[in-house]
Image (cartoon, grey):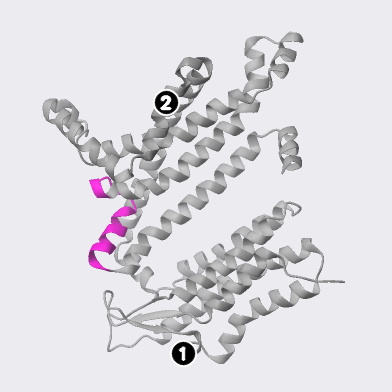
Amino acid sequence: MKYKIEKVPLAGICTGILAFGMKYLLHRPNRIASGTGLFTWGILTPVEICFLALPWVMCIALGLTLNNRKPLSFLYGLLGNLIIILVFLFAGRSARRLINPEFEFARTSLGFGSWVMVLSGYILVISFLQNKHTSKAGRIIVSLAGITAVILMILSGYLDEISILKEYSIRKDRFLGEFSQHLLLSGTSVFIAVIIGMPLGIFAFRRKLFEKPVFFVVNSIQTIPSLALFGILIAPLALLSHKYPLLRELGIKGVGTTPALIALALYALLPITRNTYTSLKVLDPSVIESARGVGMTRLQLLLNIEIPLSVPIILGGIRISMVQAVGNTTVAALIGAGGFGVFIFQGLGQAVPDLILLGTLPVILLAIFIDKIMQMIISIFTSKGISYELEVAG
């Protein structure tokens, strides 16, 4: 019998092996100095190196000996989580070893090799999640085990000597405030886009004459760079706030939250409008006629046929808009709207990589979290018949 390792886990294994040739940690005399890169063999003990390499060795061994895809993919997922845990575990231990009372401003951060190892583990996790024949419990365990362990390390103070967490401890209150602002901006902008986009999609479907003009406008908005759109809104809003003091008292001015919300809502329009239009267009006319033939009223038709079939597609558009808004909100910090972009641009201005990561990583994690939550919501609103058809089609 011929055994072989599948492409996705093989990519994860190869990525992890290559990461051992990259710098594991970066030690700097202060937060802005370039610092010295440390390889695994220069900072970890031989026993720690063996433990760190063990998951990849096990992946190769399992891939060459097991031929049953279901348990094999689950083991890949568990080993991927183990890789993520070990990377942070040994990074925390190593950072503590590097503490020197004579250099109180010294910083230790994760090197490029550490992040590539984490990527390797995540690829192995993805290889499991791609398997459709896995249980929900298994998917939850594999999806959350690694990140949960890392969060526990952070909360316990085990990783306090890692420089990004030192930046966080200095700015803890500011971080929580910008987190709230980031959520407020992205959430409110998508809510506004839903209020405008859904009726716009319905209008484009009902009035064929306006279909092309509507999508020309919303498509054109997507072609404008985010920073340019923020800049375009500054002058007219500043003029309005100057001319009408009441608007200024309400907080409507050229910089800050107002232009950010307008721009973010405009960017969020396309996925919602397009998916609303598509959800109505794909409805089979014969289904509508059959429902009318059995005596369904317009309200019954709406509640029992059109909405159940349309909601999953509309929610798919909202999902795209929410993930997009989380990323675009980062740029809003440049016009004084706040959010995690504050840390990113401060880090760029001060040449502090860890401060940049303090703003970047939460945006990535927040986008992934929102995407997963929306996937769950979509699955709840998708009827079993539609789910089965999509599975068969896939």
The x and y percentages for residue 362 are 42, 57
Measured along the vertical axis of the image, is residue 364 above or below residue 57? above
Q: Is residue 292 above or below residue 279?
A: above
Q: Is residue 13 above or below residue 378?
A: below
The structure residue drawn at horizontal position 43% and vertical position 79%, both measured from the top left corner, is 25
Which residue is labeled 2 in the image? 196
Q: Residue furthest right?
A: 1
Q: Residue at x 39, y 42 (%)?
A: 186
Horizontal relation, residue 187 to residue 40: left or right? left
Neighbours of disc 2 within 10 Å: few (<14), some (14-19), many (20+) = some
The location of residue 319, given as percent across then percent down, is: 52, 40
Which part of the image, by quadrant, shows the N terminus?
A: bottom right
Per the rendering, the mark at residue 173 is none
In the rendered image, residue 168, in percent from the top left (x then y), is placed at 35, 65
Q: Residue at x 74, y 36 (%)?
A: 389
Identify the magenta region. Answer: 334-351
Q: CA distance from mark 2 to mark 1?
A: 58 Å
User: Residue at horizontal 33%, vertical 68%?
Assistant: 353
Q: Would residue 189 be found to the left or right of residue 62 on screen?
A: left
Q: 270 or 53, which lies in front?
A: 270
**Which x, y percent locates residue 192?**
40, 31
- CB under 8 Å between discs 2 and 1: no
Look at the numbered disc 1 and give the secondary structure of its residue. Answer: helix
Q: Is residue 377 visible?
A: yes
Quadrant of image for the C terminus = top right
State the SS at label 2.
helix
To which residue does mark 1 refer? 42
Res 250 → quadrant: top left
Can the viewer see residue 77?
no
Q: Is residue 251 magenta?
A: no
Q: Amino acid at mark 1?
A: Gly
**Residue 55, quarter of the rendered image:** bottom right
